[in-house]
Amino acid sequence: MFVFFLRRLLVAVPTLILISIFVFLLQQLLPGDPVLAMAGEDRDLATLAALRERYGLNETLPVQYWVWISAVLQGDFGTSIRSGEPILDLILQKLPVTLQLAAMSLAFAMLIGIPMGIVSAVNKGTKIDLAANVIALSGLSIPNFWLGIMLILLVSVRWQLFPASGYVPPSEDFWQSIRTMLMPSFVLGTGLAAALMRHTRSSMLEVLRQDYVRTARAKGLTERRVVLRHAFRNALTPIVTLTALLFGELVAGAVLTEQIFTIPGFGKLIVDAVFNRDYAVVQGVVLVTAFGFIFMNLLADMAYVLLNPRLRHAR
């Protein structure tokens, strides 16, 4: 188990290094000059030179990268050119918001997708199976931005059931925080529920064909016990793996939904940073997001081994 974890960790480290290099170099391709944007109306040469020297932008790219990554390894992500705040503080302010949105979205996806996948697999070839597949295809096809706008118009504007936008921290008002996050979580969760449903159905169909499932039925066990205790338990491995990956995808890809519902999370932070050409913030957010995604991959691998004991002794 430890050797398996160590191998995965050794793969994750060079991956993060390559991502950091890629993110740093990609920033250089963005149009515009952050120093010009920061200087505003006062664009005399002395001011521009002073700003470049202050933020190290007059150095060569390898030197800039080395200075940046060395500071990151010490927990210093730099300072926002636009606001002057430490980037790590900005990340720590926005990260809990996106994590809450991702967790609630994943809860919606699991509550909808996994039961639908089980029911669809058990009733393969029936109208129930067809209906579940149609719903899943609809969830994959409907754009998040359209669904979000429709929910705002119907649920918030017309029916006035939930707030149309904004965010309230759970520490201030827990239930109001849940109410403000319900619609964006549902929007994100529906698309993921469709993918989870299809994955659950495929995994369940494979397990239901196994000999031990037929043996359990031959012993006279109830269909519910056969499906939930024997089949679903053995079908969990790929489902757990996909769930961990989906959580990482939610943290990284909730930009559009956060913009629609005006949620001050990672999405809004990185969009504002791109528009303001605040490269250091973009680099910090993308690097933290990549680390989170790799960490979730590592957790998925560990869960895979825990759920499948045969892999613990695999070479």
Image: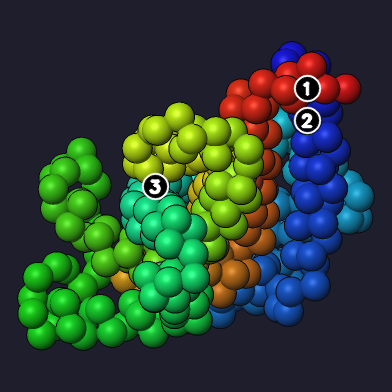
Farthest residue toward the top? 2
Residue closest to the eye, 200 or 49: 200
Q: Is residue 4 above or below residue 236?
A: above
Q: Secondary structure at mark 3?
A: helix
Q: How many neighbours does mark 1 have within 10 angstroms: few (below 14), some (14-19), or many (20 or more)?
A: some
* Residue type, label 2: Arg
Residue under circle 2?
8
Q: Quadrant of residue 174?
A: top left
Q: Position of residue 142 (x, y in %)?
A: 45, 82
Does any portion of residue 21 appear in the rendered image?
Answer: yes
Distance in Å between CA atoms under marks 3 and 1: 27 Å
Asked if labels 2 and 1 touch by Cβ distance under 8 angstroms, the answer is yes
| Marked residue nearer the N-terminal end (3 or 2) | 2
Q: Which residue is mark 1?
A: 4
Q: Position of residue 40 (x, y in %)?
A: 56, 76
On screen, residue 96 versus residue 302, left or right, reads left
Q: Quadrant of residue 16?
A: top right
Label 1 – label 2 distance at C-alpha: 6 Å
State the residue in front, 27 or 128: 128
Q: How would you rate the neighbour count of disc 3 (Cα within 10 Å): few for under 14, some for 14-19, many for 20 or more? A: some
- Please name the residue that numbered disc 3 is placed on: 103
Image quadrant containing the N terminus: top right
Question: Could you tell me which secondary element the residue under label 2 belongs to?
Answer: helix
Q: Is residue 259 above or below residue 192?
A: below
Q: Amino acid at mark 3?
A: Ala
Circle nearer the N terminus (3, 1) = 1
Nearest to the observer: residue 41 or residue 124: 124
Between the residue at mark 3 and the residue at mark 2, the CA separation in whole angstroms equals: 25 Å
Please tell me the numbered disc located at residue 88.
none
Label 1 secondary element: helix
